[in-house]
Amino acid sequence: MKNTLVIARAIAMGCVLGAVVPIAAHHSLAAEFDVSRMVTVTGTITSMRWTNPHSWLHVDVRNARGQVEKWEIEFSSPNSLYRRGWRRTDLPPNSVVTVVGYPSRDKSAKVLSASDVKLPDGRTLFAGMPAGETP
Amino acid sequence: MSTRTSLLVLGMATALAVVWAATAPAARQAPAPAAAGAAAPAPPEFVCPDYSPIAIQACGREHAKTFKPPRTADGKPDLSGYWGGSQVAHEDLEAHPKTPDDNGGPSALVDVPDGKVPIQPWAEAKRLENKAKYIDQNAQCFMSGVPRHLYMGAYQFIQTPTRLVLLSEETNAYRNVFLDGRPHIGKDIVLWQGDSRGRWEGDTLVVETRNQNGNPRLDQQGRFLTDEAVVTERFTLFESNSILYEATVDDPLVYTRPFTLAIGLRRNVRPGYELWEESCYEGESNSKYLRNIGYRTYPGFSGKEARAAKEAFERRSAR
């Protein structure tokens, strides 16, 4: 299979919330994202933008109809990611990642606020801001 | 209070109690940030707990009575260094539970019996409108304003005999607090972070801020200030690694009385820690999606607008 892989998308409702570490964003998540559910997306990295106030991972995801969807995954800031061990080499283009996060309330947008990311090498890193942590 | 409301309050209180009971005070303290590639040292032992603003105010004041602070060459307590602290007040000044959106915590207020922000009825309606309609300033990379600036991230304080510079990594924001007795800048200019003037009262630095522009909101719940607000902050070192930070908000157009919040600012002792650039606008995409679902940029709220809104509200209420 080429650069885009078919991947499952699982939606977990309600009961997941109690197990999720909240994200201390610099603004409310709930205004923009549906924090009542989490979505799991697996796809192929097209690019990672290490920008402020949020980094953005761009991923191609093949949906159930076989079409490629362009997803944007919001991460914490580059500074906080770096201080927690993330490096630019962790997210190489054309590799496959699995992301768990909250979906946008804008139904026209394929956007997630990431919580956990499973990297190509099998590691799982937290992409948000741990509770109470100074950036 | 209705039965339904009583049950809701009871439920929230229970949820908060469970959260707090499940974590020891030490575990609730903000961990020191990591330097690039360095292993995290054990956090310093802080002498007062963070879990309750009322407790940290009382404990900090008690320790300050006997603590001998490190001093600058001109004999003032030395506030220089890297600092951080609890950020839950920016979620909600009042007590709120842990949710996927919030870390949760007690009320940040220390001088109101019920921990509730003493907001006027017309202003409560405006607050709800703010929350429902307008994008939080931090989401758009605007500055936090005062006092939210100091419960919103990582800081470096640089102190000279005539100035305390408060640097924040968030949005590259800074405040110049002048200590040389100069007057405020006057009414012709308003600023996101206002105009701060400081003076020493014993070993406490007292900072008065005026001339905010009526744009920053105090928390993510839409609580707001007008451009006529006066905020008085007090910085008191009460042990080597802790500052008792108290901020009194006085905006009689909006609130029924001044109110004070308290936070423990904790020294960031991570080896090699630095503040880094946060060029906030480059990746700011949140407002695009927020606009798509109806939110707008907050236009600010002046004292003149507050008077008109209050009069209109009272006329409607009298009918």
Image (spheres, rainbow, N blue to C red):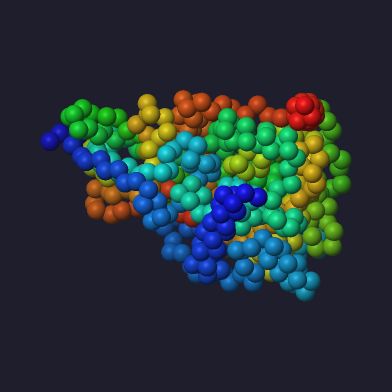
The relative height of residue B239 versus residue B84 in the rendered view (above or below) is below
- Residue sitting at x 79%, y 41%: B251
Q: Position of residue A99 (x, y in %)?
A: 31, 44
From this viewpoint, which residue is outermost toward the bottom?
B66
Q: Could one spot residue A110 in this view of the protein?
A: yes
Q: Nearer the viewer, residue B8 or A111?
A: B8
Report if residue B306 is visible in the image: no
| Relative horizontal placement of residue B183, taking residue B290 as reference (left or right) | right
Q: Nearer the viewer, residue A11 or A77?
A: A11
- Residue B221 lies in quadrant: top right
Q: Quadrant of residue B47?
A: bottom right
Outermost left residue: A1
Q: Residue at x 59, y 36 (%)?
A: B131
The x and y percentages for residue A35 are 43, 43
Q: Nearer the viewer, residue B308 or B137?
A: B308
Q: Is residue B92 above or below residue B60?
A: above
Q: Percent x, y for residue B137?
A: 59, 35
Give the side of residue A19 with respect to residue B22, left or right.
Answer: left
Q: Say which of B27 and A103 sits in front.
A: A103
Can you say which quadrant of the picture contains the C terminus of chain B? top right
Residue lying at 85% horizontally and 59% vertically, measured from the top left? B201
